[in-house]
Amino acid sequence: MSKEQIKKLIADRTDHDGLTETGIEGVRLFRATQAIPCVPAVYEPCIVAIVSGAKEAILDGNRYVYDDSRYLCCPMSMPVKAGTPTASAESPLYGVFISLDLWVMTELALEMETAGGDLPSVKGGLREPGIRLTGWDATFTDALLRLLQLGASPTDMAVLGTARVRELYYAILKGEAGIFVRQAFGAGNAIARSIAHVSSHLDAPISIDDMATRAGMSRAAFHRKFKQVTTMAPIQFVKSMRLNNAAMKIAGGMTVNEAAIDVGYVSPSQFSREFKRMYGQSPREWSDGHQVLAGGA
């Protein structure tokens, strides 16, 4: 019943396709009433929960399809392709996009590590790809419903919003993907910290040696562990992050040259070559043929 209540709340509060702000920081609703092919996107740390229809994300050729039985968990920034290939006016997609706040998640993960109890301990950093689908459970569903119910009252949102978001984070950390997420936000995960640095410094020069140094690893060890988590070599990951961000910016109306500079390309010709190699179109062809349809969710 709770999922039906969540679906009704989203349907009542969304009057257009794409993202709709809830008034609670980091929590957005989304709707899709037409099929959207998978296009370049960057998932910042987030949870994407679908209550009607299905959504798809592709990371380095690996396909993740999720619906109201499994939600997507992405605790680190990841360059993906995302779409809603089965949505239609007769069968709309409804969902919730929840940003994961680095500091709050880290604080909760550390509190859980030190609180004892029956939680399995987390040792070391991530050892699996940076996206995971995880089953809905009653605790997550109830926490999400309680969070969205605040939308009926601005006062409730202002007073209780932060606490309800924290409650949802805790449900995620206790759920099926709890160890996976706690590894990403725990104190020992150098790869997650490295990815966070890359994500926030795409306009600056980035080298494998610098990434390895920041992670406190040798170049060889860093390369091996980084590929284990992201499925990509570090330089391939950086290039994908840059080009996906550029594709989104161009689709959103930014000029090709502005987008190239914004994601760290000095040479327009190099940007055009690498863009066409990845997407099969020049940046200008991409600009003419694409627009942001699902708000990046």
Image (cartoon, grey):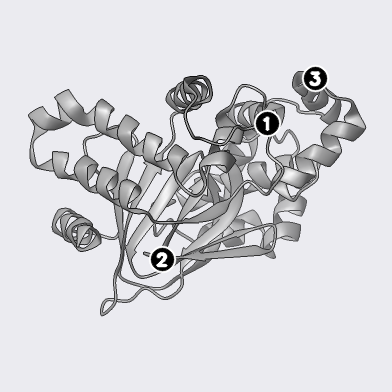
Tell me which label, 1 or 3, sits earlier in the chain. Answer: 1
Image position of 224 (left or right of 49): right
Residues 1 and 191: in front is: 1
Q: Nearer the viewer, mark 1 or mark 2?
A: 1
Tell me the kind of residue under disc 1.
Answer: Lys
Q: Residue at x 22, y 30 (%)?
A: 161
Residue 295 is situated, as x and y percent measured from the top left of the image, at 39, 52
**Residue holding disc 3:** 216
Q: Secondary structure at mark 3?
A: loop
Tell me the kind of residue under disc 3.
Answer: Gly
Q: Residues within 10 Å of mark 2 (few under 14, many from 20)?
A: many
Residue 156 is situated, as x and y percent measured from the top left of the image, at 11, 31
Q: Secondary structure at mark 2?
A: loop
Q: Is residue 43 visible?
A: yes
Tell me the kind of residue under disc 2.
Answer: Asp
Q: Residue at x 21, y 57 (%)?
A: 2
Which of the numbered marks, if any, corresponds to residue 67? 2
**Residue holding disc 1:** 123
Residue 22 is situated, as x and y percent measured from the top left of the image, at 22, 41
Q: Residue at x 76, y 48 (%)?
A: 232
Image position of 30 (left or right of 224): left
